[in-house]
């Protein structure tokens, strides 16, 4: 009997085994019939060491949850103490070495970083929650008080008189610089003549925009300290982008990066690095805060909406095709005038991600940074002249919220930023390649047509150079050098700014331009206002907000023209403030 029972059990086990194998085979051969819960969690090990570790972790997790606030405060306090101790050590080391302080490097630069860091902490923890509401109440009070209006008017009159006296005295030795001032008013007049709604123009933002440009020009061009700060910023940008060259040298080799640099490998490698860094800043919310601060500042002084201001500021840091990401949720609420202002801001500035490409061909980094910063407020004010607001805007400050990153962690965000650089680099390479090839083709055709009638050297550059000579002259360029600068403007307008900057680098190396003409040309070229950029921005905005496609295409060409003229106005300010021989290194 026992033997029979054992035999039956054995057969039962074999049958079960067979059934198990059969079901496994079926599940392998028919994956669509696979049980949804087949991937079950394995049972935990119940050994004493494992259970002890699990209990310890649970206790630690409970303690961390209970004292998380205290733990965070202790960690922040420790970091602040460590930072203060380190800064004290830096100061003592500088004192013992007896070296002069350098505000652009070393101890001076570290002092500035510490100051900005703790000012930010003070602003968000004390000034914003406690002091700012009190100042806001005063601001609301002043609008209802007549005396504040007279004080404001008196300030503007004083600024006007001061600027007039300064310009008269400063140009006493070279009155030809006043041509640039005449050019500034000429471009404002042109904007009013071709305004979409001249009866709705608010001259307040336009005039304030001109004043801001002049004051910024005085601070960063004529004031020694301001000019040194901008030069320092330019050198710091160069030093920061040099890290990208180190990475590119590791990937591509020294031959393509150092010995015989190739544009697609050496100059554009920084695009990957900057997108990498930008996405990290975006993930932590720092990029949004920086842009929002600048945007609210411009809104308060130019009376523009926050979305317009945020986008224009962001385009300086991110670029015109990346900046819309900060305001994507609000694009569908923009009026036609706001869309025009947004596009003008993108066309009138250049992105920080392509600074290295311009610098690599010999353009002065200080001029690039100065021009891009000065053009931001000018673009907003000129956009409101070309296309004034006729509708009620719904994008007020209270409706703007911080845009959050979708990535789950900072590593994912960084990798996404690096990968996003691929498309941008390919666009730049493809655009430059095709436009250079097309320009060569057109020049070949024009040269052939010219030879048929006995005209040698006919090219697109010569034609555009002739057409833009009046523009170069009205900006204040030396008449003897106006043809070269006009050629650069024509190349930038019809092709793109990089090809124009490459040509400017050649003229600079050949000493064919004075310091003032070089600066005017650099400022005039500092913008993405060309047909290729127009197509790119139309595609970007239409993709992010299909509802606004009709309005985007409606104002695109007008925005390109406004962006170009904004660059010319910035160049006029530079021509007014820069002497013919420029500034000496020790000035």
Image (cartoon, rainbow, N blue to C red):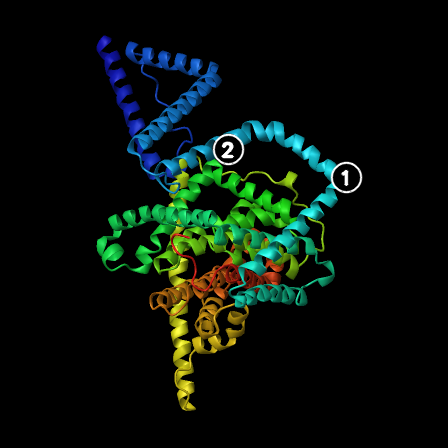
Identify whether 132 is placed above or below 503.
above
Q: Residue at x 43, y 91 (%)?
A: 453
- Name the residue that disc number 2 marks: 120
Name the foreground residue: 529 vs 114.
Answer: 114
Residue 81 in sight in this render: yes
Rendered location of residue 6, percent (x, y): 24, 13
Q: Residue at x 44, y 23 (%)?
A: 76
Spatial CA distance of label 1 from label 2 is 32 Å
Q: Residue at x 42, y 86 (%)?
A: 450
Residue 433 in sight in this render: no
Residue 100 image-quadrant placement:
top left
Q: Secondary structure at mark 2?
A: helix
Rendered location of residue 249, percent (x, y): 26, 50
Locate the N terminus and report the quarter of the image it occupies: top left
Q: Nearer the viewer, mark 1 or mark 2?
A: 1
- Name the residue that disc number 1 marks: 145
């Amino acid at each position: 009997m026992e033997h029979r029972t054992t035999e039956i059990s054995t057969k039962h086990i074999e049958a079960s085994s067979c059934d198990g194998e059969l079901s496994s085979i079926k599940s392998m051969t028919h994956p669509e019939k696979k049980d949804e819960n087949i991937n079950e969690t394995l049972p935990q090990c119940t050994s004493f060491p494992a259970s002890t570790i699990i209990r310890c972790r649970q206790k630690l997790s409970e303690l961390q949850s209970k004292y998380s606030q205290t733990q965070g405060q202790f960690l922040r306090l420790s970091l602040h103490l460590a930072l203060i101790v380190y800064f004290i050590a830096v100061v003592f080391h500088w004192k013992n070495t007896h070296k002069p302080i350098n505000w652009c490097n070393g101890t001076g630069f570290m002092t500035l970083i510490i100051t900005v860091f703790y000012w930010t902490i003070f602003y968000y923890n004390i000034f914003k929650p406690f002091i700012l509401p009190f100042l806001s109440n005063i601001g609301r009070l002043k609008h209802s008080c007549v005396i504040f209006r007279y004080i404001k008017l008196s300030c503007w009159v004083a600024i006007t008189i001061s600027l007039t006296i300064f310009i008269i005295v400063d140009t006493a030795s070279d009155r030809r610089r006043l041509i640039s001032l005449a050019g500034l008013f000429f471009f404002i007049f042109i904007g009013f003549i071709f305004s979409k709604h001249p009866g709705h123009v608010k001259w307040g933002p336009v005039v304030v925009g001109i004043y801001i440009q002049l004051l910024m020009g005085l601070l960063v061009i004529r004031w020694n300290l301001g000019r040194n700060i901008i030069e320092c910023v330019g050198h710091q940008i160069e030093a920061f982008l040099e890290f990208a060259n180190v990475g590119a040298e590791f990937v591509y080799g020294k031959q393509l990066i150092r010995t015989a640099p190739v544009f697609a490998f050496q100059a554009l490698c920084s695009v990957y690095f900057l997108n990498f860094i930008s996405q990290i800043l975006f993930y932590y919310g720092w990029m949004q805060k920086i842009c929002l601060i600048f945007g609210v500042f411009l809104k308060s002084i130019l009376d523009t909406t926050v979305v317009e201001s945020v986008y224009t500021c962001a385009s300086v840091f991110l670029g015109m095709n990346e900046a819309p990401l900060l305001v994507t949720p609000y694009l569908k609420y923009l009026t036609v005038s706001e869309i025009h202002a947004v596009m003008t801001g993108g066309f009138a500035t250049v992105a920080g991600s392509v600074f290295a490409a311009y610098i690599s061909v010999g353009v002065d980094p200080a001029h690039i940074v100065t021009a891009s910063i000065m053009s931001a407020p000018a673009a907003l004010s000129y956009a409101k002249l070309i296309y004034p607001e006729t509708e009620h805007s719904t994008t007020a400050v209270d409706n703007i919220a911080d845009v959050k990153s979708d990535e789950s962690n900072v590593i994912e965000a960084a990798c996404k930023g690096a990968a996003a650089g691929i498309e941008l680099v390919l666009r730049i390479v493809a655009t430059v390649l095709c436009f250079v090839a097309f320009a060569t083709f057109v020049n070949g055709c024009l040269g052939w047509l010219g030879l048929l009638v006995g005209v040698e050297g006919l090219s697109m550059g010569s034609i555009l150079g002739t057409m833009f000579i009046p523009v170069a002259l009205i900006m204040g360029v030396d008449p003897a050098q106006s043809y070269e600068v006009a050629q650069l403007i024509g190349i930038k307008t019809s092709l793109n700014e990089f090809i124009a900057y490459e040509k400017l680098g050649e003229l600079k190396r050949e000493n064919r331009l004075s310091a003032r003409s070089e600066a005017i040309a650099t400022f005039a070229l500092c913008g993405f206002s060309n047909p290729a950029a127009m197509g790119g921005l139309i595609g970007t905005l239409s993709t992010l907000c299909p509802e606004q496609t009709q309005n985007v295409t409606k104002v695109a060409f007008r925005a390109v023209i406004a962006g170009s003229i904004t660059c010319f106005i910035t160049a006029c300010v530079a021509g007014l403030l820069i002497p013919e021989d420029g500034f000496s290194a020790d000035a």
